[in-house]
Image: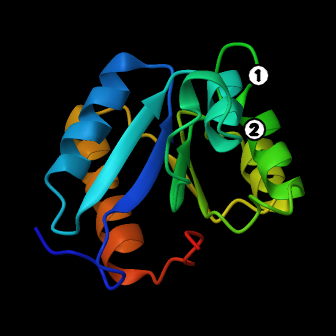
Amino acid sequence: MIINQNYRPIEVLLVEDSPSDANLTIREFGKATIANNLYWVENGEDAMDYLHFRGTFAHVSRPDLILLDLNLPGMDGREVLSEVKADSDLKQIPIVILTTSTDEEDVLRSYNLNANCYVSKPIDIYDFIHAVKLINEFWLAAVKLPNLHF
């Protein structure tokens, strides 16, 4: 495993209500060549608590990257995206939309809310794993993420 240019693991927040999709994503990020810590929450409310260090998330690290499903119970991913990108303390965190939705309205709305990219989850498990590997390679290895840990 390679440590990134900041000599600390990249902190990743996965917001995903599907345990099977979360487990596949966690597994693939665990194979990354770049050191990372992936933390999983299952709904939008927990995501916002995590990002604001509330309750059980009082001592977590600020994520360098958020992987966000749109179709969540309660506060959905669209609301999370909107709140994060409207918050001056959080808006710099890159957000990758990773969702089953292929609806053009969701794509356009996500980009209008300043999502950094939009990936539709493939139905085939091997295609899904490949998509997660590509996200991993691009966002962990190729992209220079902002240092929000100061």
Q: Is mark 1 on a helix, strand or loop?
A: loop
Q: In this view, does 31 lie above or below 21?
A: below
Q: Which colour scheme is used?
A: rainbow
In the displayed structure, would residue 1 be above or below residue 133? below
Callout 2 amino acid:
Val
Rendered location of residue 77, percent (x, y): 70, 34
Q: Earlier in the sequence, mark 1 or mark 2?
A: 1
- Amino acid type assigned to the residue bearing label 1 in the image: Met
Q: Which mark is residue 80?
A: 2
Q: Where is residue 106 in the image (x, y as percent from the top left)?
A: 75, 43
**Residue 29, image x, y percentages:** 25, 50
Residue beneath the point at 31% across and 40% down = 25
Label 1 sits on residue:
75
Q: Residue furthest top?
A: 73
How far apart marks 1 and 2 lie (CA) works out to: 7 Å
Q: Nearer the viewer, residue 103 or 48?
A: 48
* Residue 138 point in image, percent of width and height: 37, 72
Q: Are marks 1 and 2 in contact (CB under 8 Å)?
A: yes
- Please tell me whether residue 105 is drawn above or below residue 62 in the rendered image: above
Residue occupying the point 31% across, 70% down: 8
Q: Residue at 36%, 29% (x, y): give it.
A: 22
Where, quadrant-wise, is the C terminus in this rendering?
A: bottom right
